[in-house]
Amino acid sequence: MINSTVFTIGKKAKDAFWNVVEDCLVEVHGLPRQDAHQRSMDLRTRIESPLPGIGISSEIFYHADPFDVACDIVGNQLDILQYFPQYDPILERHNW
């Protein structure tokens, strides 16, 4: 028998994910806080409320690394290992 339990990501975990994304936009990419917040919330809205038949499941999206999501938002892919000294405290701050 196959276990059909579906794992869903709770609001608290999603909030932490987006807080990490926002802090990466500010601390790694140098965006002003207000711009970083707006950009991350715009993407979150699109991910969590996709048009029918278009987009990906938000549950799948949350398997991405927040650092990479921030890089995608600004269109500048960075090497996570090079920026880990900045990234690790962000992860710790948000218990991610």
Image (cartoon, grey):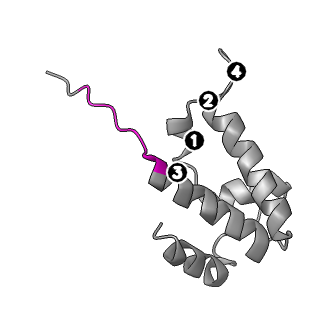
> In terms of image quadrants, where is residue 74?
bottom right
Instruction: Return the disc, 2 or 4, that comes first in the chain's sequence.
Output: 4
From this viewpoint, is residue 28 visible? Answer: no
Image coordinates of residue 67 in percent, x first then y, are 65, 63
Q: Quadrant of residue 37?
A: bottom right
Instruction: Based on the picture, tell me whether residue 8 belongs to the magenta stretch.
Output: yes
Viewer can see residue 24: yes
Which circle marks residue 56 in the picture? 2
Image point (85%, 69%), residue name: 31
Q: Report, in whole angstroms, how far the alpha carbon at label 1 lies from the one at label 4.
A: 15 Å
Residue highlighted by disc 3: 14
Q: How many marks?
A: 4
Residue type at numbered disc 3: Lys
| Residue assigned mark 4 | 51
Question: Which residues lie in the magenta part?
Answer: 4-11
Disc 1 residue type?
Answer: Phe
Structural distance between the alpha carbons of marks 2 and 3: 16 Å
Residue 6 position in % (x across, y down): 33, 31
Check if mark 2's residue and mark 1's residue have beta carbons within 8 Å.
yes
Q: Which residue bears the numbered disc 1?
A: 61
Which numbered disc flags the more N-terminal residue, 3 or 1? Answer: 3
Q: CA separation, marks 2 and 4?
A: 10 Å
Are the residues flagged by discs 2 and 3 in contact, CB closer than 8 Å? no
